[in-house]
Image: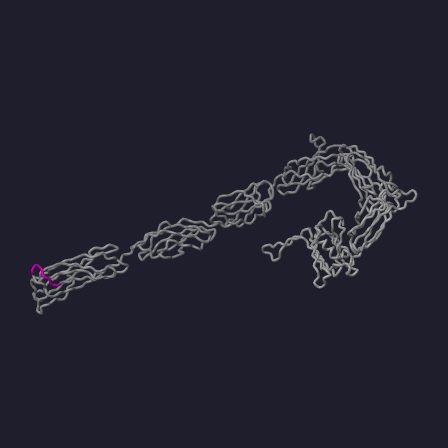
Amino acid sequence: MATWSGWSKPYGDSRAMAVGVDAWISSSSDTEVYITVSVLAKSGDAGTWEAAYQYGVVTQDGHAAAGNRGADWNEAGRGVLNAGNGVAQGQHTYGPFTRETSAYNVTCWGKSWGETVNGYGAWAGSAEVYTTVTVPARPVYAPPAATGVTNTRQDDSRNVVAWANHSDATHPYDSIKVERSIDGGSWSQIASISGAATSYVDASTAANHAYAYRVRAQNAAGFSAYATSGTTYNTPAAPRGIVASRSAANTVTLAIDNPALTATALELQRSASGTDGWAAVKTVPGSPVAEAEDEPGGGTFYYRARNTRASLASGWSAASNKVVTIVAPAAPSLIAPASGVTLPKTQPTVSFSWKHNPIDGSEQSAAQLQHSVNGGSTWTAVQVTGNDQETAVANSWEKNATVTWRVRTKGAHADYGPWSSVQAFKVCQVPSVAISSPAADGTVLNDVPLSVAWTYADESGTQQRAALSIADSQERELWSTVVQGPAASLSIPSSELLPENHGSFRIALTAYSTSGLAASASRTFSTDYEEPAEPGLQVEVDPVRGSVAATVFEGAAATGVPRTASLGLFRARPDGTLLCLADGVASGTGVTDLYPPLDCDLCYLAVAYTENGLTARTERAARVPSGGAVFFNFGDHGYADVAKVAMDVEWSMSVATDGEVIDTAGAEDPLVFFGTAKSVEGGVSGDVWRNAAIAPARWSDEACRAEAFERLAADTGIKIVRYPSGSVMPAHTSCKTATSAANGLVSSVEVTARKVRADELVL
């Protein structure tokens, strides 16, 4: 045995017994071991201790608790001591014991004590002995490589690298090293992370670069092999600039300064302005594309480009320089003479004009004009040099000829462009017209109606229509008409035109030919005719009702003066127009002007008419005083009923323009949009007497009393409100009366009015 206990001497003499133990690792693997413990009992040798004979003993082997490995034991053997012979020998194997990252010790023992064995008495004492066995640390080997390395692009500044780990107890991952290659260059470590990690976020990527990653694990024994991802590509950089040059008449070569590292293609666009209207030209594969070619036809062009890789696209480059290709121009646009016009044969030359339409931007270098009088069967050519886009041609065509013309132009290109479409015009004789009645300028007319006649001559057509107008000496147009067809005279009824007596006038006539030409003539005349006798006019103002009564009479006619056939009665408005109160009435007819403006100078006119429309006038002035009162006309009988507020009267008026206020996002002040409509509102208040018998004289008339305002409140029609100093308006009113708390004989009146449209009223 490797280790023995001390001697057990229970009898106080030289008889002795000892126990020996031996322990060792009997089998092992990288992760665990088994330990075998052997025990043997013996008595002393004759030379040292007195041998013990024929005592029964039992042995036990085992190991003590070690961490969480527990403790265990077994009986080793039984035997009878016989001097120096070993007895009760036995052994047992224990385990497994896990190999840890560090070595540790397991305590093993052997014990012996007496028991009766095979009829021999038991040894009276006992002995035990201990030994230790070291469980070696678990071995560590280089780690296996990770697998399934992926590289996922999230955006231009962020990639996610992921992998699968394959560590175990003897092949641990203490750490993982992440390395990166940019654009296929050398590898450099960018991170050392926990051995348990299975992904890494690289937040230091940038556009226009390609990234690949590889990872390897590390432990105390060394590194694993590398595991490598695929490559991700970020958005390519935009081209830095494009230089465009014309390499042939219609071919453009593009040199592209292209720093893209990740592009697989280049998209090319073309524009005529360089600012908008970009159109796709082509997609050119390549990494990167440094040159391209286009055949755009003729014109002025700009180019721009961007790099792409699948769905990734750079920004567009700045527009290239302007490049002009050379091509014959498009057909010009004809301007004049326009198609369908008629030109007079008396015009010595005809000016032709057109617009050069270059495709390549080059100005006109020459033009050819052709004209034909037989619809294009034969042509006469006119050559134009330089950039002139008009030319004059002698008017040598026959009268009533139809001239067809066309133009083609040349630019920088050697060829002319196509002919324009054709336009056609006519060359005709100008018609002549002369006014025959009145027969001469300055003719004096002494009667109405006015008759006008003219003569018309036309070698290229007939009179299609004639336009006439008559103006006074101030060139103010008094009357006009258009006569359709060939008619060459008309009589103007006095109802349409009654020239003022002793006035001067001018007739203007323009006759239009079916050829499209026209001729004009004019004639002056004056008037000096006998008028009827001046009518009589009687005007009476009613200050109580605010009205004016007017009566018109036939005047006394002298010998030879035309007889008065009827009479008319009018009031002049401030703008000079006349308000008709009566017309076509007999002598002695009276009319009441129920609601004239207050406090204004009014002018009433009586007009006498003869059978042929001659007139004579008489004027009378009048003024309707308001006395400071506000008048309301109402009722179903021509607004003849009147109510007025004269006592303690107050009034107000407001005018509001129709509009809409709109708040706009991001602006401190709103917008205002004004309409054309206006809202006019007014308010009138005052007091009226309830009993005329006791009312002061100035407020005792019927229109000033409460009964008048009770009728006003009950009336459902439109009212006419007249304010002092002239304002008259149709209105919708609301009237409220109440007995005065201070004076029961007086009622307070409040009227609100809003101006309304009253088309049937003539104010």
Asked where in the image residue 78 lies, by quadrant, the reply is bottom left
Q: Nearer the viewer, residue 80 or 738?
A: 738
Q: Nearer the viewer, residue 226 or 244?
A: 226
Using residue 653 as the reference point, say whether residue 494 is left or right of it: right
In percent of width and height, residue 349 lies at 76, 37
Asked where in the image residue 462 lies, by quadrant, the reply is top right
Residue 118 on the magenta segment: yes
In percent of width and height, residue 200 lies at 40, 54
Q: Is residue 394 visible?
A: no
Using residue 231 as the reference point, say whether residue 594 is left or right of it: right
Q: Residue at x 56, y 40 (%)?
A: 295
Q: Is residue 77 visible?
A: yes
Q: Tell me if residue 89 comes above or below residue 478 in the rendering.
A: below
Q: Residue at x 77, y 52 (%)?
A: 595
Q: Quadrant of the N terminus?
A: bottom left
The magenta segment? 113-119
In percent of width and height, residue 655 lies at 70, 55
Q: Nearer the viewer, residue 222 or 38?
A: 38
Residue 223 on the magenta segment: no
What secondary structure is the stretch in magenta mostly built from? loop
Q: Name, please, the residue furthest toward the right.
A: 559
In percent of width and height, residue 181 lies at 41, 52
